[in-house]
Amino acid sequence: MERLTRREMLRLTAGGIAAWTLGAPRWSWSAPASDPYAAARIDWRQLAGERIHILVTPAHYFTKFRAITPEFTRLTGIEVTFEVIPPREMREKAVLDLSARTGNYASHTADPMYLPLYAVNNWVEPLDLFLNDHKLTDRAWFDLEDIVPLWRRHNTVRGRLWGMPVEGEVTIHIYRKDVYDQLGLRPPETLDELRETARRAHAPARNLYGLALRGFRGAGQNMYIWPSLFRAYGGQWFDHAGRPTVNSEAGVRALEYYVSVLREFAPRGVENWNWPEIMEAFAAGTVVQYIDANSTASVIENPAKSKVAGKIGYQRWPKGPTGKRVTSIWNWAMPVNAALPARKKQATWLYIQWLASRPTQLRSATFKEAPDAVVRTGVNRMSIWRDPDYRRVIAFTPDYADVVLTSLREDTDADWRPRIPEWPEIGEVMAIAIQEALVGRKTPKQALDDANAELRRVLRR
Amino acid sequence: MSCATVTSLRALPRVAAMLVAVAVWVVPVLWVVATSLKPRTDIFTLPPRLWFTPTFEHYRVALGTADILRGLSNSALVATLTMLLTLLISIPAGYAYARLRFPYREPLFFYTLFTQMAPPVGFLIPFFLAFSRLRLLDTHAGIVLIYLSMSVPFAVWLMTTYFLDVPRELEEAALVDGCSRGRALVRVVLPQVYGGVAVTAVLSFINAWNEFIYASVLTGARVRMAPVAIFGFLTTEETLWGPFAATAVLIMGPVVVLALLAQRQIVRGLTLGAFR
């Protein structure tokens, strides 16, 4: 039954690809609302009549999820409403709701770095409560092990899973293949080679800059990119006694690298650039390369939005001096709010299970909610990443899918960022230090010494 | 050199200074308007392109987004209600402070402004908790109450100072002629302070129309206000600057129209009374 369902899904996806490439204005097949779900040995309608309200961030994948959620309502009789608000405001609202135990939001798209904070306060329920409940979950059908292992590990605190990954990304090196070809450059294998390609391609007189990385201050901005450098240089966040060690030699060298490449080769004002600014500059053809989320491909490869579509190359992070490539670990994690009544918690779990399941992930990946809708590049299941049909849909270049899949498998590092309840404060302290070094207010050594002292204070509290 | 030329030459630095001051205010607004009309690939061109073929595509996208339309109508409803209720409360209250004698008048007047002395964000969490218990989160009534708590104290203070400037003799004559106090207020005193009423009305409308912090925390999917709805264009993959700017222009529009309509009264209101 499961094989047949899977094959059927693949066939439908292939049909979808055909429609998409032929420029069909709307998804041209009618979806099988509940077929693949009938294979799950649970009663999907056990909580019919419940209503849940979910807080999500504006993103194409949530637009797709929201667009197909009426199918969940038809399947289960559970009504789902959404509130859409950008990540920063969403975090504030979620933390306020959880800490005040008002139970307004059944679930939200959580930043996994906040899960230790949620867990230590028991603001959300550990998901094994639901995963191990045979009435609520068919483990064989759901196949938790198929969900990207490091994302699951990232969302695990004290041995328990607190948020289900529903979408994610890795950071990769994105470069202008045409410029590289013109200059006879090879994609860099190491960070030193990356600096060299930036130097050779840097031509500010022609409004073309060698490299851009996130410079904007924030735990999710410059502290989304710099930790990869820190770890690739061999940096450790803490010593064996749990004392912070960000000002180690490795740390200082990682920050010196970051500051020097950006000061020399990035456009002016990069200290205020976050990923949208970098991506826009790259799409406008003024930046040769950047390292950021693989999901940006769906925008920069769209000719209506980008002047460089079709001229782009992708590869994994260059290696640091330790020989390691370190990418980000990022996923949107969906928890179950602990302040809800029992039945609402169960209804929320049914929704999370449905959303994270293979049929929903596969179907939403290519769902076209609007004529110019993009494809999802952050599905949560390894089996979909290996699926030839899905790989064809995201073949921006012949090796794009492989670059992402290999990064997911080999370049992730569980200690990429410190996963402790104090993270929100640690992230901010580090973000300020990195930006201070970038704008030259402090030397990298000074900035990290000060940050390390501040982190000690934060951790002692 | 004629007298007139000398005068105009002398005025030159002053005119230049005024132009710079106006430019500081106008350029960002024009920038937003230009961005709302630029094709997407031209928005980030460096140096910025001044001549371009305008497109209304971003307005089409903005107005085609259900959240934006609902946001604008929610904001219009909430801001209008706030404005009307503010006037309804602040006119009689201001008049009472200006004319009537009652116990604790002075300390009460001082405490009217008390709530304005802390930054609004200080009340955010208490309001959130209270609203959560009272089931006022994400309701029109709730957010109007919050905006009233912000606009009424200031409006009462403003109206009081306007009423204090009206000569007592005017209404005393009306009272002697047999008018009740209420009638004297409406017929005789109020026409003297129309400028002040216009200033109070416009300020309370604009405050409610533009407010963001409370709107973002205390409202949700049901009563989403325009300044919060516009945030939907800051997506995780990209900032949709075109529709974002178009919505910003749509949000600015009513305020500009309102200010222009009430311009004469506002100028009169600002030059009369307390601000003289």
Image: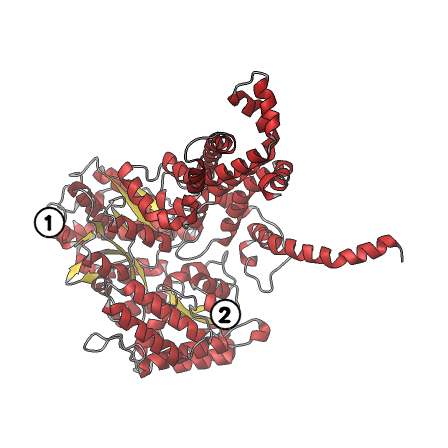
Mark 1 nearby-residue class (10 Å; few <14, some 14–19, many ≥20): few
Residue B57 is situated, as x and y percent measured from the top left of the image, at 54, 47
Label 1 with label 2: CB-CB less than 8 Å:
no
Measure the C-alpha gap from mark 1 to mark 2. Answer: 52 Å
Label drawn at residue A287: 2
Label drawn at residue B127: none
Say what secondary structure mark 2 lies in: loop
Residue A154 is situated, as x and y percent measured from the top left of the image, at 23, 64
Vertical arrangement, residue A336 with respect to residue A211, above or below: above
Q: Residue at x 40, y 50 (%)?
A: B118
Q: Nearer the viewer, residue A415 or B198?
A: B198
Residue B66 falls in image quadrant: top left
Residue A13 can be seen, yes or no = yes
Q: Residue at x 55, y 57 (%)?
A: B43
Vertical arrangement, residue B95 with respect to residue A203, above or below: above
> Which of the image's four quarters has the C terminus of chain A?
bottom left
Q: Amino acid at mark 1?
A: Asp
Q: Which residue is mark 1?
A: A133
Residue A188 can be seen, yes or no = no
**Does residue B157 appear to the left or right of B114 in the view shown?**
right
Q: Nearer the viewer, residue A255 or A378?
A: A255
Residue B167 is situated, as x and y percent measured from the top left of the image, at 61, 31
Q: Amino acid at mark 2?
A: Val
Q: Nearer the viewer, residue A60 or B224?
A: B224
Residue B104 is situated, as x and y percent measured from the top left of the image, at 41, 36
Mark 2 nearby-residue class (10 Å; few <14, some 14–19, many ≥20): many
Subunit under mark 1 = A
Q: Residue at x 54, y 58 (%)?
A: B41
**Does residue A12 appear to the left or right of B266 in the view shown?**
left
Q: Nearer the viewer, residue B59 or B259?
A: B259
Total of numbered circles in the picture? Answer: 2
Q: How is the image coloured?
A: secondary structure
